[in-house]
Amino acid sequence: MASKDPVDPSEIRARLLQRQQYHDQMSALDRVRRFARIYCSDADGLDGLRADLQRSAQRSPAALERDLAAIEALLADPPAERELVELVTVDANTPLDELTAAAAAAWLRRMAELIRAAIASVPPPPPAG
């Protein structure tokens, strides 16, 4: 049976702000792991991944921009080789031809390209007025 208590908008705003703060405090590695688990771990091939990213870009380009920034941060200052390889092979459930940091970095660069393309595919909002 549904509750008849009214929804307090301030509680909803507070929970949304709390969730946003949590995501903003994530390390680059944790954010990319989250991206890999959400988008890549059960993606239906590259076309499916591309379609998922485009849908997300239409809904929330800012979230994908944060994911892109995290990927770029990892590429600029990569973690240990094992963590980078596990990010791809475990978190993203994606096999690599070679279990090396170079192969994992190449995969990350490809994800960054796909995110950039998805964000670029979203038309700008119409002018206000």
Image: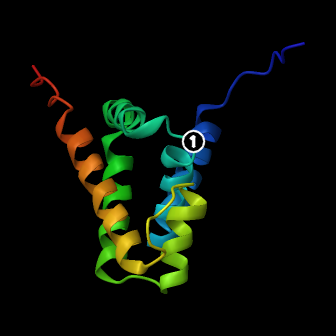
Left or right, residue 53 beside residue 93: left
Q: Secondary structure at mark 1?
A: loop
Measuring from the top left, give residue 88's x and y in whole percent: 50, 63
Residue in view at x 14 percent, y 31 percent: 124
The quadrant where residue 58 appears = top left
Measuring from the top left, give residue 81's x and y in whole percent: 48, 84
Q: Nearer the viewer, residue 111 or 8?
A: 111
Any part of residue 27 in sight: no
Q: Nearer the viewer, residue 45 or 124?
A: 45
The extreme front residue here reads 97
Residue in view at x 28 percent, y 80 percent: 76
The quadrant where residue 128 appears = top left
Would you place residue 118 above or below residue 123 in this image? below
Measuring from the top left, give residue 90's x and y in whole percent: 60, 62
Name the residue tied to disc 1: 42
Measuring from the top left, give residue 79's x and y in whole percent: 46, 83
Residue in view at x 90 percent, y 12 percent: 1
